[in-house]
Image (cartoon, rainbow, N blue to C red):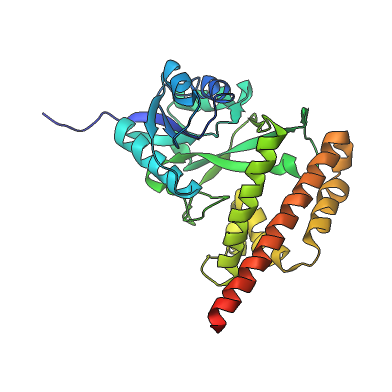
């Protein structure tokens, strides 16, 4: 007689914090791919847990340390409870389109997931009540389905990614992963102000040499890391980054074709870049002052 858990082909997880306005939409789409779902909650004070449980998700409360640490805990809990071969994850403010569900479900039904190590989802952003088709946002591919034995997030406090071995096989899925994270502008601005603080700390880590740099070989093979490569090797060295970010999105990326929403998104991205830059300069000055004492 054995105590080993039976292996499931795929299980999923979602990390949450006060997501009662998004969690039902998110889980409803994810449940069409797998019934084995862990919701790792960061001590929500709203009805997130109750709503997730009502849909059949297994909810676990875990105190938030940072995004990478939270995702790694979610992965370990998902492995421990469901023992899957693959893990699928989306954020609480995201959902899968029918085409994406069908592509993934067909691979699960045919038992052909093991043809690739990682599957990328094509993200589509809704901002200011409009789907952004320009500005560079239409080119984002994210690793959201991955083999369990390579499922570990790098120790980065924000904009974290799966740590991927060089010989990993990657496949793009059909359809879209929809992201619509604006519940209220007050919350959205506060959230991204927080992100800029975390990103400034990561930029300082890169400046001090404590964050590993993405190689050009890795950036060519893995599309989701190309933006990180460009940021590390080129972008962070440029002056006037907020203005350049606006031009990159609105002019070069043709965000102007998205109308008012495209303009607002370009301004918003430039504002966040300015916040990050100012906070980084302050942290760098404090670090230099500390070293002189």
**Count of numbered labels shown in the rendering:** 0
Identity of the residue furthest to the left in this view = 1
Which residue: 46% across, 43% down? 117
Which residue: 44% across, 16% down? 54
- Is residue 216 depicted above or below 100 in this figure? below
Which residue: 69% across, 41% down? 189
Q: Nearer the viewer, residue 25 or 196?
A: 196
Picture coordinates of residue 250, whole percent (x, y): 85, 46
Q: Is residue 114 left or right of residue 197?
A: left
Image quadrant of residue 201? bottom right
Picture coordinates of residue 282, whole percent (x, y): 66, 67
Residue 65 makes an appearance in the image: yes
Identity of the residue furthest to the front in this view = 293
Q: Is residue 97 left or right of residue 156?
A: right
Picture coordinates of residue 256, whole percent (x, y): 89, 41
Identity of the residue furthest to the top in this view = 54
Image quadrant of residue 245? bottom right
Q: Nearer the viewer, residue 259 or 273?
A: 273
Q: Nearer the viewer, residue 254 or 101?
A: 254
Identity of the residue furthest to the bottom in this view = 292
Image quadrant of residue 230? bottom right
Picture coordinates of residue 165, whole percent (x, y): 46, 55
Q: Is residue 260 left or right of residue 14?
A: right
Residue 220 makes an appearance in the image: no
Which residue: 30% across, 36% down? 80
Q: Quadrant of the N terminus?
A: top left
């Amino acid at each position: 007689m054995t105590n080993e858990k039976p292996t499931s082909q795929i299980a999923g997880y979602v990390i949450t914090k006060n997501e009662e306005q998004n969690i039902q939409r998110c889980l409803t789409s994810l449940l069409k791919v797998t019934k084995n779902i862990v919701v790792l909650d960061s001590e929500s004070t709203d009805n997130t847990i109750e709503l997730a449980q009502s849909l059949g998700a297994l909810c676990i409360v875990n105190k938030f340390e940072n995004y990478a640490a939270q995702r790694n805990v979610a992965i370990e809990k998902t492995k421990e409870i469901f023992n899957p071969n693959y893990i699928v994850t989306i954020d609480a403010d995201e959902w899968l389109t029918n085409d994406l569900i069908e592509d993934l479900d067909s691979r699960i039904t045919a038992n052909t997931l093991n043809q690739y190590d990682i599957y990328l989802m094509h993200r589509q952003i809704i901002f200011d009540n409009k789907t952004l088709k320009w500005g560079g946002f239409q080119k984002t591919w994210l690793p959201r389905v991955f083999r369990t034995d390579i499922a570990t997030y790098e120790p980065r406090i924000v904009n974290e990614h799966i740590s991927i071995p060089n010989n990993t096989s990657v496949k793009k899925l059909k359809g879209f992963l929809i992201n619509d994270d604006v519940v209220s502008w007050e919350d959205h601005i506060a959230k991204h102000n927080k992100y800029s603080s975390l990103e400034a700390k990561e930029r300082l880590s890169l400046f001090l040499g404590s964050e590993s740099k993405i190689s050009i070989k890795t950036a060519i093979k893995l599309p989701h890391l190309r933006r990180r490569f460009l940021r590390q090797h080129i972008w962070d060295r440029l002056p006037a980054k907020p203005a350049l970010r606006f031009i990159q999105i609105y002019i070069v990326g043709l965000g102007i074709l998205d109308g008012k929403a495209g303009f607002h998104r370009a301004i918003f991205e430039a504002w966040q870049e300015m916040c990050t830059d100012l906070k980084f300069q302050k942290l760098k000055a404090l670090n230099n002052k500390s070293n002189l004492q």
